[in-house]
Image: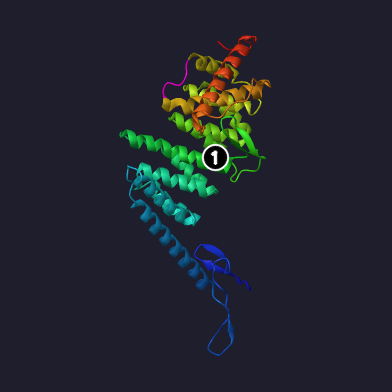
């Protein structure tokens, strides 16, 4: 395929045009007397602009369809409607540059909290570029606190989704589950230099956003992340302090050990407050036991997965008994250790 390169002077800007990249086929033309004539740069620039305008207009129509889609509250209509909305957003993210352009206007304009949550999730899930990272950072900075409780809840989820998108771009490692088992070898992040964005998120007003930021920071494997994890050991939230301490053990850093031992005492004194809190309760125990193993090199038996994920009641009961056993075993072991950690 022939490629035509040409320089053109556009007011205050010199433009280098590669017609093939613009999707414009370079075809030789002839003037009135039959002599060959080259395609003018102005026509190429015009074709590129027309194509860009068409793509942007298409993206605007797709987003408009999404914004007009219903949000029924009762299943199964709500589930079907959500799948339909996400399918529309998938169409949008298939054209990344245009999607970022039109989504930015909606996110800081007419979109409501639920729509902002879904739009941010779609962008962070599918577009891993610096421009997208910058947009998600702006979303995190845009802390909205509506009086309506449901709207306020979704605004926190908006920022959590933005953090999750940044995590996908900044991660050097893939670890899963409460035990944080490494699934693949470490690799370079998709977008460099995002740790400062995550540090900002780790200081968010909302506890859930700070916890999400700690997960993301731990996955960066960056020395600056360690510094912020240590800072979060002084957080007002017990949950944030515990996760910060546990994530530090992935760096063989025991500075959070006093907090982990305090958490062990809290867990020993009570179980989950309600059936709804069981998932969070066992997830924290799973993380705590795995962190003790990392930092001490000891094990008192297999750490089970969350009992709520079991396929049978019998297996669920067995895993709960194993959690109780590990809780007792670690409590007794630490009771025999000299308290040299500064724990009070």
Residue drawn at point x = 57 percent, y = 19 percent:
260
Q: Which is nearer the eye, 10 or 155?
A: 155
Up-down relation of residue 185 to residue 64 (above or below): above
Q: Where is residue 232 in the image (x, y as percent from the top left)?
A: 53, 25
Up-down relation of residue 212 to residue 191 (above or below): above
Q: Is residue 254 left or right of residue 231?
A: right
Q: Which colour scheme is used?
A: rainbow
Q: Position of residue 42 (x, y in %)?
A: 51, 72
Up-down relation of residue 336 to residue 110 (above or below): above
Q: Position of residue 18 (x, y in %)?
A: 59, 67
Q: Mark 1 points at which residue?
A: 167
Q: Which is nearer the eye, 127 or 35?
A: 127
Residue drawn at point x = 41 percent, y = 49 percent:
83
Residue drawn at point x = 49 percent, y = 56 percent:
94
Residue furthest to the bottom in view is 33
Q: Where is residue 145 in the image (x, y as percent from the top left)?
A: 35, 34
Magenta span contains residue 272 = yes
Q: In this view, does 333 lie to the left or right of 137?
A: right
Which quadrant of the rendered structure holds the N terminus? bottom right
Q: Is mark 1 on a helix, strand or loop?
A: helix
Q: Which is nearer the eye, 266 or 144?
A: 266
Magenta span contains residue 337 = no
Residue 221 in view here: no
Which quadrant of the rendered structure holds the C terminus? top right
Numbered disc total: 1
Q: Is residue 282 left or right of residue 57?
A: right
Magenta residues span 270-274
């Amino acid at each position: 395929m022939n490629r035509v390169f040409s320089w053109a002077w556009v007011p205050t800007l010199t433009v280098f045009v590669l017609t093939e990249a613009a999707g414009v086929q370079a075809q030789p033309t002839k003037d009135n007397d039959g002599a060959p004539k080259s395609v003018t740069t102005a026509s190429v620039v015009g074709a590129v602009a027309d194509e860009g305008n068409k793509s942007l207009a298409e993206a605007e129509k797709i987003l408009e369809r999404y914004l007009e889609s219903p949000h029924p509250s009762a299943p199964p209509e709500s589930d079907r409607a959500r799948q339909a909305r996400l399918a529309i957003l998938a169409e949008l993210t298939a054209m990344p540059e245009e999607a970022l352009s039109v989504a930015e206007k909606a996110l800081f304009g007419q979109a409501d909290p639920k729509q902002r949550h879904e739009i941010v999730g779609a962008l962070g899930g599918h577009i891993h570029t610096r421009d997208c990272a910058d947009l998600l950072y702006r979303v995190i900075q845009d802390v909205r606190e509506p009086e309506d409780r449901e709207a306020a809840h979704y605004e926190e989820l908006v920022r959590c989704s933005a953090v999750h998108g940044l995590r996908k771009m900044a991660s050097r490692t893939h670890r899963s589950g409460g035990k944080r088992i490494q699934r693949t070898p470490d690799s370079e992040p998709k977008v460099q230099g995002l740790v400062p964005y995550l540090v900002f998120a780790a200081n968010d007003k909302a506890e859930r956003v700070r916890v999400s930021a700690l997960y993301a920071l731990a996955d960066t494997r960056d020395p600056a992340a360690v510094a912020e994890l240590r800072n979060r050991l002084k957080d007002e939230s017990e949950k944030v302090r515990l996760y910060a301490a546990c994530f530090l053990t992935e760096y063989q850093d025991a500075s959070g050990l006093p907090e982990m031992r305090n958490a062990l005492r809290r867990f020993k004194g009570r179980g989950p407050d309600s059936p709804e809190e069981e998932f969070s309760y066992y997830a924290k125990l799973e993380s705590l036991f795995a962190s003790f193993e990392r930092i001490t090199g000891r094990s008192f038996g297999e750490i089970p997965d969350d009992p709520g994920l079991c396929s049978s009641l019998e297996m669920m009961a067995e895993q709960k008994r194993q959690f109780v056993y590990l809780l007792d075993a670690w409590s007794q072991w630490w009771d025999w250790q000299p308290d040299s950690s500064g724990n009070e």
